[in-house]
Image (cartoon, rainbow, N blue to C red):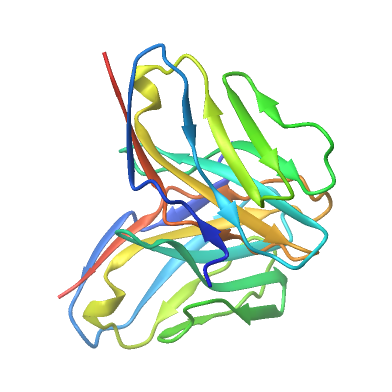
Amino acid sequence: NAGVTQTPKFQVLKTGQSMTLQCAQDMNHEYMSWYRQDPGMGLRLIHYSVGAGITDQGEVPNGYNVSRSTTEDFPLRLLSAAPSQTSVYFCATRSVGQSNQPQHFGDGTRLSIL
Amino acid sequence: AQKITQTQPGMFVQEKEAVTLDCTYDTSDQSYGLFWYKQPSSGEMIFLIYQGSYDEQNATEGRYSLNFQKARKSANLVISASQLGDSAMYFCAMREGGYSTLTFGKGTMLLVSP
């Protein structure tokens, strides 16, 4: 009963390095999204997808790329990491069939950029 | 203008007392949903309660209830009979129209004392 799985849980990068944060879900949810959480800022939407092959930008997309080739996976790529991208990253999924369905969150990835 | 405003950065309550966490929202959509999530110190995001804009009754889930005042655009979370385990960060979030994306407030840290 995995739900939403994020890997890795922790990562330290040097400025300029690239990295992919993985998100996988086994609930067949159409909607998947990435948020970042910074102290005092709540959660802010980075990118989202409403199905395989469809992605769109959220509130803070700069510096991040996404793709959605399957229903199950929605990786988030940092092409050239910057210290401002130090944050906790959450992947969330949702079934779009019913309006009262909440988003299901992964456990998060803590990313530090030195 | 912020779409979700949580004006209480921190709240203190004694065990077994009730507490109200404030949330006001801003939207021009007629169809929207309001969600509350709990984030304990372990970091995961836990869905608590949902209120739809067309729901005529306030939502309740166990010790959680939502005081929904549509005309005032407020959706306050009420926790009855607080427990030590309720100590956490609480986020209010809104989904507008047919979109699945959520906009989060900045959160309220609740501390429950014995």
Give the x, y percent position of residue B4.
55, 59
Examine the rendered structure and indicate whether residue A76 appears above or below residue A89: below
Residue situated furthest front in the rendering: B72
Q: Is residue A28 visible?
A: no
Residue under the point 42% across and 51% down: B7
* Camera-nearest residue between B52 and A26: B52
Q: Position of residue A61 (x, y in %)?
A: 49, 82
For the C terminus of chain B, the quadrant is: top left
Taking B82 as reference, is B69 left or right? right
Identified at 68% across, 69% down, the residue is A70
What residue lies at 42% left-to-right and 56% top-to-bottom? B106
Q: Is residue B68 left or right of residue B53?
A: left
Looking at the picture, does residue B108 appear above or below residue A87? Answer: above
Residue A95 visible from this viewpoint: yes
Q: How many marks?
A: 0
Position above or below: B111 against A2:
above
Q: Position of residue A96 (x, y in %)?
A: 78, 56
Residue A75: % across, % down: 51, 70
Residue A73 lies left or right of residue B5; in this view the side is right
Most extreme residue toward the left, as rendered?
A: A114
